[in-house]
Image (cartoon, grey):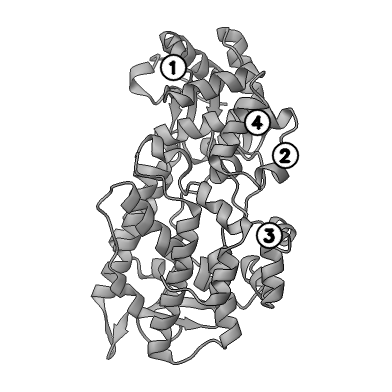
Amino acid sequence: MRLSQPLVELLDTREVQRLRGVRQLGTAYLVYPGAVHTRFEHSLGTAWLCRRLLAAVEEFQGPVLAPHQRLAVEAAALLHDFTHIPFGHTLEDERRIFPRHDTPERIRAQLPRGELGKALKKLDLLEPVRDILVGQAEPFLCELVSGTVGADLLDYLARDAYFCGLTQRYDERIFRSFRLDERGLYLDAQKSGLIRQDVLSEVVHLLRLRYFLSERVYFHHTKVASGAMICRAVEAAVGEGLTLEELSRLTDERLLALLETRYASLPEVARLLAHLASRRLYKRVYVLTRRIGEERVQWFVDQYHFLASARRAAEEHLSRKLRLSPGELIVYCPALKMQLKEAELRVQVGEGNPRPLSDLKLSDIEVLREKHPDLWKFYVFLAPDKKDRASRVAAACEEHFQQANHLPALQSGQMYLGL
């Protein structure tokens, strides 16, 4: 990867170098030992792919960006993850302890600070990069970096599969079919008035890869369990004064070291870290799936994902009933983010404007769109040294949540009609 001197100046700042210590996939390395790649490599790759996308577009369309626009969009690609905290998606998206790293408020607050802020001001890039990252620049500039299928996604799909040792990859010749208009990127899937089936097949393969990684990596139950353990430890530390401002300066290992020292007196934190250190991970004892029905899924999300108080109340009630110590039982409820948004990539297949891929009603796309929501699962995890109580815990969860356990080995056989 050959980067221009201005990008190297941004790269060699404390804020960007910190990303060398923030793993791209959080605790996935406990499932796939090779998954220790970081936000730093991903940021490099995103900037490089952004340049490659632009080169492919301009080979067909001619110059589309002025020199300073080009530099700004490549800089935004390099910096798109600079606000990531350790185990960021786990703490932000799954347990919702902190707001997301890419909220406009966080970007506007952090971008002008420190060595990175000085370098951006020196290069006259602070405002254009900020506008791209918060989505206030021209849509085609934002799309190049983090669109439905932009440089961000194209890098992490290939990188995550490779470092997890999964033999899945898309064909990079798809870059030749990208075009750019005022709305952003789209795929040109026609030639001489005929639909190019090879282009459509490759984008379908890209969507299959996205599903494959979601199923095997992003929502793997062991990754979810270990992430939930990290969340509970951080949640306890936040109750004792740990702040987002402090976290934003840490790496993964520095956060774990901080928890082991400053918060070692908290029994819950000490217990969780001891289990993590020896990979004695929490076990599933209660699982709900999409089979409970869309309305019930939405109710669980509203109650136990968005309301931290309700989630904590359920954990405390079940722990008291089962005589478990704080942190030995964890309730986990993901958001409804299992939609295949990549199916909205625009494609040109005939006269008129490019339209969403989903409009073509391709059978493979419809199958993937239907399968994605099945990735949603509600879990109750139990500490491994309490596994002898698994049946009792599962039965108590069935009674508390009024839904039969979908984990076959721990089903009680009772019928629950729900609330």
383 in relation to 197, above or below: above
What number is the disc on residue 384? Answer: 1
Query: For this rendering, which residue is in front, 376 or 61?
Result: 61
Residue at the image point whose x is 66% and y is 19% from the top: 266
Q: Position of residue 278 (x, y in %)?
A: 43, 23
Label 4's element?
Answer: helix
- Label 3 is placed on what type of residue? Ile
Label 2: few (<14), some or many (≥20) within 10 Å? Answer: few
The mark that comes first in sequence, 1 or 3, is 3
29 in relation to 180, above or below: above
What number is the disc on residue 235? Answer: 4
Label 1's element?
Answer: helix
Label 2's element?
Answer: loop
- Label 4 is placed on what type of residue? Glu
The residue wearing badge 3 is 107
Does the residue at mark 4 contact the one at mark 3 (Cβ under 8 Å)? no
- Label 2 is placed on what type of residue? Thr
Distance from disc 1 to disc 3, alpha carbons, whole Å, reads: 39 Å
The residue wearing badge 2 is 243
Q: Nearer the viewer, mark 2 or mark 4?
A: 2
Q: Nearer the viewer, mark 2 or mark 1?
A: 2
Image quarter of residue 173 = bottom left
